[in-house]
Image (spheres, helix red, strand yellow):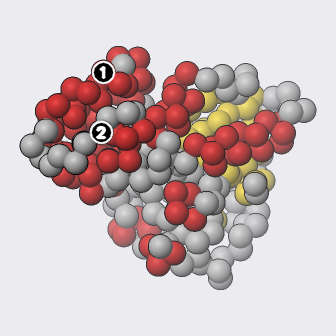
Amino acid sequence: MLSLLRKHRASRSHDANQSARFFELPENTRAYVVGDIHGSFELLKGAIRMINEDAAEYSGDCYEIFLGDYIDRGKQSAEVLSYLAFQSSHKRKRICLKGNHEEVLLDFLKDSSLIQMWISLGGLETLSSFGVSLNGADPHLMSNELRYDLQNAMGARLIEFLSQLPTSFELGDYYFVHAGVNPKKELSAQTTAEQLWIRDAFLSSVRCYPKKVVHGHTPVSAPEILENRINIDTGAYFTGELSVLKLEGSQVSILRL
């Protein structure tokens, strides 16, 4: 499974405070940014405990920013979504962004013929986490039933939570998004598809934007902290590594479990 990870760019500083010196959060503001969770609830709980400890004595404005892909592949998607939607953020401001996996789930709830696409992305694990079982049947033959059962299991509040997730968030000199941005466009001109799905065109670009882009979507063996972007998707569901980025002033660091 490690072959799925993009090789970490070791030539760029992991600390990277130097490359981040021109990018800052507002004064008296701190942000904790969490990478792709993919149904790994135990890792999420560990990350939250670590954030709680680190932020215990902090009195300024404090954010939790989640970069999307809360579901699929891992076995505890229901628990992850329930926590993010309904549990306390300990007085921090919680920002949850939409990932491409959340988009596919929502599309399936509108059109059950998309069952195969969702399954290919790990949707069976999400169905199972909500107690929806195939019972050995062909999912294509019971896609409408699966959609109906999932809607009932999730409930209107959770579906509304997912439906209202934003695709980007800006704070100070940082632009937070799930997958990345189209380097041929300004940040204000990005489409939802680009923000949720883009990969190679963005990852290969060295363009520096007015704000540093913080993203996930493409698993890497260690967080990439580059001049124009920061990638913190470390493949939690198969590596056991859920990365948390800490931003404060011009300082950039990675919290370790």
> Hey, what amino acid is under mark 1?
Asn
Q: Which residue does the numbered mark 1 point to in the structure image? A: 152
The residue lying at 84 percent from left, 39 percent from top is 53
Cα gap from disc 1 to disc 2, whole angstroms: 13 Å
> Hey, what amino acid is under mark 2?
Ser
Disc 1 to disc 2: CB gap under 8 Å: no
Residue 233 seen in the figure:
no
Q: Position of residue 136 (x, y in %)?
A: 22, 48
Where disc 2 sits, the SS reads: loop
Q: Which residue does the numbered mark 2 point to in the structure image? A: 133
**Among the 4 quarters of the image, the one containing residue 54:** top right
Q: Residue furthest top?
A: 156
Between 43 and 163, which is closer to the camera in this rendering? Answer: 43
Between 34 and 60, which is closer to the camera in this rendering? Answer: 34
Q: Residue furthest bottom?
A: 11
Between 13 and 210, which is closer to the camera in this rendering? Answer: 13
The residue lying at 54 percent from left, 69 percent from top is 220
If the image is split into quadrants, where does the C terminus sit? bottom right
The residue lying at 90 percent from left, 32 percent from top is 57
Q: Residues within 10 Å of mark 1 (few under 14, many from 20)?
A: few
- Taking 129 as reference, is 55 left or right? right
Q: Position of residue 87 (x, y in %)?
A: 61, 23
16 to 169, vertically: above or below: below
Q: Nearer the viewer, mark 1 or mark 2?
A: 2
Residue 223 seen in the figure:
yes
77 to 22, vertically: above or below: above
**Among the 4 quarters of the image, the one containing residue 198:** bottom left
Where disc 1 sits, the SS reads: helix
